[in-house]
Image (cartoon, helix red, strand yellow):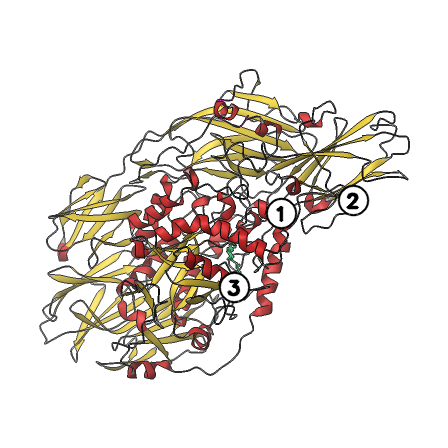
């Protein structure tokens, strides 16, 4: 399909640099144990609030696995929802979030910066601080991220010197941005009481590198008061900036093992990394092993298979296999790119990708949970609560079936606890394979399982724990995986899980022979040599087992089947205590006052719950409502969260009154373009070669986004037979040509960048008079700068425009004018910003805005029954009523065919919420975030339809919620949406 250019260059580049140097494995275990398990704490000398050693980062002295997810405030243009999404991160037990900051989003023009409204980054820091997430700041200046110019502002295309290099011009521009953004980042560092703990230098700067540039960034951050450790994400394990000039405090790398082609989602490549620990020991052994971007989904191109397929490729099984492999390798800082992808609204994406940036991520574009989200929670909670995992060294365990199943041994250097990470050697294997492991524990040496089966069923990976002291208990081993454990006062509790029907063994140390085990028939127990072994099959739900008499405190073992385990939440009520609740779709927060616990969260149906609480808590509320709890056996409370159907209302757009206006007067030869910019440049700063003059590259004239218009006037003669045009723009771009008001053709750039319009003399060309060529170019953003070679400067416009049949053609044979968004870099609409609107006549005249007087327009109905040429605008208003206490994320969906090609821009309350290409797809559904859309009132909808073929008809459009949740979604303020009147001033 489309797009391949950009992607291939990425994968080739990676292939070229990922050569593995084989060195013998160094056995650190003995050495570290000799050192007493304590490797030295390091800091950058600027703050000791964030320190590190070979294992992990420590925040205020506390060792932690940094389980972080990527979130982009600019992909959710409704700041009120940032808290909603970050609460979801926290609920999934992430303890970190990584923010890219997008230079171009804040800077429409050199010297102009905006941090107001949807650009108020302080609100993103506040949301992270409120929920208690550590923040990784990544301000570039280059960030990639499938963004227009890879995050650079469009005005940087004017820069003569290369970007991402040490030179006076680039240094000055870089400093301009960093001065602006560092103010916010510095003020929100942990040293100032804020959430920021790490700061990244540039992004994957791994090709055409320049250490002086990196050193300059470091110095600039320092000058601006950034004292938290610096980090850098190498494109792979390639050693870029690991040491020496430009190196950060904590070096790390990125990895996307499944790649970005979602069209064959279940055909995983077998490319699990196995050399990371060796690489780390060679490269930066004194720092924790960090993967600053690990694949959490994938982007999808225009014409691609769509995000449900990307989710399938990077699903919960992928999360099990690949993330656990990371931990086995030694990763203790992991940022999942993306955890919430969001929306590349307006003109923010680069050409490859379309509006939705759902990414198949753990949290979907409208903020919904997925199985992968719950899987990530299972892992994160384990990593936060089974502490010996944080300080391990590798050893080689003995196991059978080792040709098929790889087992990495990880031994804690501080305690006897050992972990065994089991996975198929062939990551994509779908086989059911059995295995045994020889374990050495302080309680003796065993081969586990002892009396049942231990399997990997297809794309699964397991972390098995042995010799582990938790609360007042001592685990000998478990062939089920641990979710978490907790001291509840009178008793301890541990939650373990595996796929339903798989066998499990759970063995703990007991004293004497009077241990009591209460369980149903599915569990057998046996005590020998002071070890109590439970043997069971994992149930479809959760089976409680209560052990008393043999241990210091009683122990509740909750044995869960996988599906059931996904719905267990271990929600913290303070630093050391978590409460357990099973059932809800989402548990956001829990807090205790006296003997009552207050939960907030979301449900999608009436939900039976089980709750395990400290002894002194005896009642519960859910979103402020008392819940009737029954005290069941073994300290497990049960109750029901009732789902009450809301009365949700929204306009049926098929019944709505629509208004219509034609919108391409520029095609008319009589159109007055005297105010347009004259295209008269004879040279360009772009990297795109041109064949004719003058330069017809819109960026050179200050127009950077959306639809562009070019009008060329020439005097006719009998010689002229036609003209030849070549457009240059990104993937999925299209162009339409008119001569003297007559439609000549519409072309997609992929197949027809060039077109010669011939044999027009004697027909359309007026040989005696003036002739006007009108060209509409639908652009899809600028290229990025992945390779640091200034590719972002590729032009948008025409490389060639010449008359045919003319013997003495000069560069002035055609007089050209160019038009783009109103005001160019001096935005007509600074609130919505530089990527909202392009150069359509209707955009320039505010037809997309609330309050535009469309009463003179024709009445219309959608689906459109007339064929329309050129640009057509449709306007209507719609009402929504989603009652408080519910979340029903809304979308607009197109239902039509692609018999004739057209593109649309969707404006909701003046916000460009999506570009649609009926001929390319795959996106037909567009997310309208609460705050942009008024969910308790009236909204303005405008759709601009650009016919590529001569005639197009807009199909059906409908409003549709993605789901309905009874929800504790925080209040969301309406985003300021200036109307038509404001624009007139
Ligand atoms: C990595 C980039 O750092 C990130 O910004 C984003 O573009 C991501 O890819 C893909 O979504 S680069 C990696 C593919 C080598």
Magenta-drawn segment: 846-851
Look at the numbered disc 3 and say if its residue's Cβ is closer than 8 Å to ligand 1: yes
Q: Earlier in the sequence, mark 3 or mark 1?
A: 1
The answer to whether any part of residue 758 appears in the image is no
- The residue labelled by disc 3 is 235
Residue at (61, 64) in percent of width and height: 12
Q: Is residue 551 left or right of residue 461?
A: left
* Residue in the foreground of this view, choosing between 527 and 751: 751
* Residue in the foreground of this view, choosing between 248 and 850: 248
Q: Where residue 158 is drawn, which disc sits there?
A: 1
Look at the numbered disc 2 and say if its residue's Cβ is closer than 8 Å to ligand 1: no
Look at the numbered disc 1 and say if its residue's Cβ is closer than 8 Å to ligand 1: no
Q: Is residue 442 left or right of residue 220?
A: left
Q: Nearer the viewer, mark 3 or mark 1?
A: 1
- The residue labelled by disc 2 is 692
- 10 Å crowding of disc 2: few (<14), some (14-19), many (20+): some
Cβ–Cβ under 8 Å for marks 3 and 1: no
Q: Position of residue 963 (x, y in %)?
A: 38, 39
Q: Quadrant of residue 416?
A: bottom left
SS of the residue under disc 3: loop
Q: Earlier in the sequence, mark 2 or mark 1?
A: 1
- 10 Å crowding of disc 1: few (<14), some (14-19), many (20+): some
Cβ–Cβ under 8 Å for marks 2 and 1: no
Q: Position of residue 538 (x, y in %)?
A: 29, 62
Q: Nearer the viewer, mark 2 or mark 1?
A: 1
Q: Is residue 45 left or right of residue 760?
A: left
Q: Quadrant of residue 367?
A: top left
Mark 2–mark 1 Cα distance, whole angstroms, equals 20 Å
SS of the residue under disc 2: loop
Mark 3–mark 2 Cα distance, whole angstroms, equals 39 Å
């Amino acid at each position: 399909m489309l797009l391949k250019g950009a992607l291939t260059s990425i994968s080739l580049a990676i292939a070229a640099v990922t050569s593995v140097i084989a060195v013998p494995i160094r056995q650190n275990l003995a050495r570290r144990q000799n050192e007493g398990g304590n490797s030295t704490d390091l800091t950058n000398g600027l703050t000791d609030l964030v320190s590190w050693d070979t294992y992990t980062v420590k925040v205020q002295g506390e060792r932690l696995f940094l389980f972080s997810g990527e979130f982009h405030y600019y992909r959710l243009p409704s700041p009120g929802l940032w808290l909603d999404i970050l609460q979801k991160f926290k609920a999934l037990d992430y303890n970190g979030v990584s923010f890219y900051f997008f230079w171009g989003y804040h800077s429409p023009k050199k010297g102009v910066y905006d941090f107001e409204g949807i650009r108020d980054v302080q609100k993103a820091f506040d949301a992270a601080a409120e929920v208690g997430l550590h923040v990784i700041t990544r301000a570039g200046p280059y960030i990639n991220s499938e963004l227009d110019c890879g995050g650079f502002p469009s005005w940087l295309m004017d820069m003569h010197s290369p970007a991402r290099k040490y030179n006076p011009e680039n240094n000055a521009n870089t400093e301009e941005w960093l001065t602006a953004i560092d103010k916010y980042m510095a003020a929100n560092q942990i040293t100032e009481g804020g959430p920021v703990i790490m700061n990244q230098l540039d992004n994957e700067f791994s090709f055409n590198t320049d250490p002086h540039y990196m050193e300059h960034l470091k110095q600039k951050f320092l000058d601006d008061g950034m004292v938290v450790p610096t980090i850098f994400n190498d494109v792979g394990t390639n050693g870029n900036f690991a040491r020496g000039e430009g190196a950060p405090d904590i070096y790390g790398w990125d990895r996307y093992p499944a790649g970005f082609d979602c069209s064959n989602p279940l055909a995983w490549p077998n490319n699990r990394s196995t050399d990371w620990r060796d690489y780390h020991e060679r490269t930066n052994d004194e720092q924790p092993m960090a993967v600053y971007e690990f694949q959490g989904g994938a982007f999808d191109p225009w014409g691609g298979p769509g995000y449900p397929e990307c989710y399938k490729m990077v699903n919960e099984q992928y999360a099990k296999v690949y993330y656990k492999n990371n931990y086995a390798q030694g990763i203790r800082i992991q940022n999942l790119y993306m955890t919430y992808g969001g929306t590349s609204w307006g003109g923010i994406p680069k050409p490859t990708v379309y509006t939705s940036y759902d990414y198949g991520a753990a949290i979907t574009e409208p903020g919904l949970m997925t199985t992968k989200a719950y899987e990530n929670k299972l892992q994160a909670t384990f990593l936060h609560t089974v502490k010996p995992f944080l300080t391990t060294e590798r050893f080689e365990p003995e196991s059978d079936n080792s040709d098929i199943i790889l087992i990495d041994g990880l031994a804690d250097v501080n305690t006897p606890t050992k972990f065994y990470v089991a996975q198929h050697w062939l990551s994509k294997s779908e086989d059911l394979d059995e295995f045994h492991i020889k374990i050495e524990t302080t309680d003796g040496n065993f081969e586990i399982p002892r009396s049942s089966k231990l399997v990997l069923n297809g794309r699964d990976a397991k972390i098995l724990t042995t010799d582990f002291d938790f609360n007042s208990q001592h685990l000998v081993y478990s062939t089920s995986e641990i979710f978490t454990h907790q001291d509840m006062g009178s008793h301890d509790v541990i939650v373990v899980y595996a796929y339903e029907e798989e066998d499990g063994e759970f063995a703990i140390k007991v004293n004497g022979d009077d241990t009591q085990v209460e369980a149903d028939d599915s569990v057998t127990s046996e005590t020998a040599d002071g070890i109590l072994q439970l043997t069971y099959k994992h149930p479809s739900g959760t089976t409680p087992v209560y052990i008393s008499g043999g241990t210091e405190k009683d122990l509740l073992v909750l044995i869960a089947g996988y599906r059931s385990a996904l719905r267990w939440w271990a929600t913290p009520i303070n630093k050391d205590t978590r409460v357990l609740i099973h059932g809800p779709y989402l548990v956001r927060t829990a807090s205790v006052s006296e003997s009552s616990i207050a939960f907030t969260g979301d449900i999608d149906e009436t939900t039976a719950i089980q709750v395990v609480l400290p002894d002194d808590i005896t009642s519960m509320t859910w979103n402020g409502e008392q819940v009737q709890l029954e005290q069941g056996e073994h300290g497990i409370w049960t109750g029901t969260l009732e789902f009450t159907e809301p009365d949700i209302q929204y306009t049926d757009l098929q019944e709505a009154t629509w208004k219509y206006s034609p919108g391409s007067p520029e095609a008319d030869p009589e159109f007055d373009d005297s105010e347009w910019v004259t295209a008269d440049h004879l040279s360009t700063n772009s990297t795109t070669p041109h064949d004719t003059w003058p330069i017809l590259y819109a960026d050179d004239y200050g127009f950077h986004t959306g639809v562009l218009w070019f009008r060329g006037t020439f005097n006719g003669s009998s010689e002229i037979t036609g003209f030849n045009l070549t457009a240059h723009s990104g993937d999925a771009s299209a162009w339409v040509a008119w001569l003297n008001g007559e439609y000549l053709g519409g072309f997609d750039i992929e197949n027809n960048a060039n077109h010669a319009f011939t044999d027009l003399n004697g027909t359309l060309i007026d040989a005696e008079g003036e002739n006007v060529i009108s060209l509409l170019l639908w652009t899809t953003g600028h290229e990025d700068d992945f390779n640091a070679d200034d590719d972002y400067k590729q032009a948008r416009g025409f490389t060639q425009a010449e008359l045919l049949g003319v013997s003495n053609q000069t560069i002035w044979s055609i007089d050209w004018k160019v038009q783009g968004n109103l005001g160019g870099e001096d935005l007509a609409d600074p609130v919505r910003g530089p990527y909202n609107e392009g150069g359509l006549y209707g955009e320039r005249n505010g037809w997309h805005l609330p309050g535009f007087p469309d009463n003179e327009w024709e009445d219309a109905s959608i689906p459109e029954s007339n064929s329309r040429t050129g640009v057509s605008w449709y306007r209507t208003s719609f009402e929504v009523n989603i009652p408080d206490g519910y979340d029903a994320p809304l979308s607009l969906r197109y239902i039509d065919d692609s018999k004739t090609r057209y593109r649309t821009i969707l404006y909701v309350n003046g916000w460009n919420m999506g570009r649609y290409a009926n001929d390319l797809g795959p996106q037909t559904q567009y997310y309208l975030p609460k705050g942009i859309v008024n969910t308790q009132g009236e909204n303005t909808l405008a759709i601009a339809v650009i016919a590529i073929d001569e005639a197009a008809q807009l199909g059906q459009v409908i409003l549709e919620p993605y789901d309905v949740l009874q929800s504790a979604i925080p209040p969301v303020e309406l985003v300021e949406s200036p109307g038509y009147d404001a624009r007139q001033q």
